[in-house]
Amino acid sequence: MNFSGIITTLIIMLVLGLFVGLFLGVAAIVFKVKVNEKEEAVLKALPGNNCGGCGFPGCAGLAAAIAKGEAPVNQCPVGGEAVASEIAKIMGTEAGKSERLVAFVACKAHCDDITLDYDYTGSEDCRMLSFVPNGGPKSCNYGCLGYGSCVKVCPFGAISVVDGVAVVNKELCKACGKCVAVCPKHLISLIPYDAKYAVACSNKEKGVVTTKQCKVGCIGCGICQKNCPKGAVSVTDFNATIDYSLCANCGVCAEKCPKKSILNLG
């Protein structure tokens, strides 16, 4: 055994290790990514659902935007006022007033209310029914298909299908908007949590056609519009809509509606 050769090898390895260590240490200092303390604090304050309801790619994306001043402190729909207030303290600003929203399905046509064109057996996914005749077996092309694509994407368990129609539990809903995005019929929208009335129909056919298709569909008669004391209801394309910025929750529209297409949300 060449003892001097072993010693030489050890010395070379030690010097090489020392050099690599020094190089990595200097590189870590030179290329160190500066941490935005406010961004980290905002991220911790966010609920962490990563639902995308804020319009950013997850909570980290929103935290970065808030820290840069590119998004308001109350941008998170899941966290609501409590989270907005906490983030406002971190950013040294006011949270401002934020309105709680909930998802609403604009259809109330249960199985016994709707006419069917044919019996359907196949994939139970609303998105797949765009490939079948008339977009599904129901005569009304604007109604809820009832196969629960919205149920599957809701991260909060706030939606269920009851007698062929999707229904939202407003207490569980966080207004993340995933159900809004997935519904192929575009029946789901976000409305104020405090709203007492909503039009549960999206049909845009003339009244005579709607009547043949659905027992509870809006026929565009305009009675709700004529009787609303605040001018909050309007009829466009044979379908009523409510302007919640004007609505006083008086309930006259629901009371006068001959088809009971306007729901009392309680």
Image: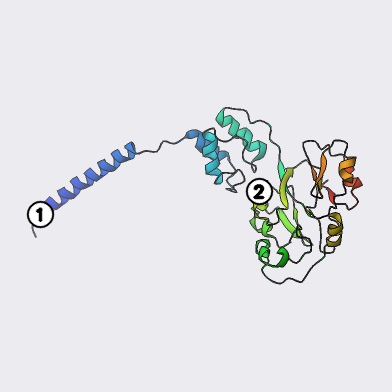
Helix, strand or loop under label 2: loop
What residue is drawn where x is 56% and y is 30%?
91
- Badge 1 or badge 2: first in the primary sequence: 1
Residues 131 and 189: in front is 131
User: Mark on residue 5?
Assistant: 1
**Residue 142 position by quadrant:** bottom right
Q: Is residue 40 above or below residue 185?
A: above
Amino acid type shown at disc 1? Gly
Rendered location of residue 190, percent (x, y): 71, 45
| Horizontal relation, residue 167 to residue 76: left or right | right
The quadrant of the picture occupied by the C terminus is top right
- Give x and y (percent) for residue 171: 74, 47
**How many other residues sit within 10 Å of disc 1, few (<14), some (14-19) or many (≥20)?**
few
Position of 2 compared to 223: left or right? left
x then y, percent, for residue 250: 87, 39
Which tag is nearer the camera, tag 1 or tag 2?
A: 2
Total tally of numbered discs in the picture: 2
Q: Which amino acid, by three-letter code, is at mark 2?
A: Gly
Q: Is residue 113 visible?
A: no
Q: How is the image coloured?
A: rainbow
Residue at (79, 64) in percent of width and height? 139
Residue identified by numbered label 2: 177
Q: Residue at x 82, y 42 (%)?
A: 234
Quarter of the picture containing the N terminus is bottom left
- Name which residue lies at 79% across and 49% down: 237
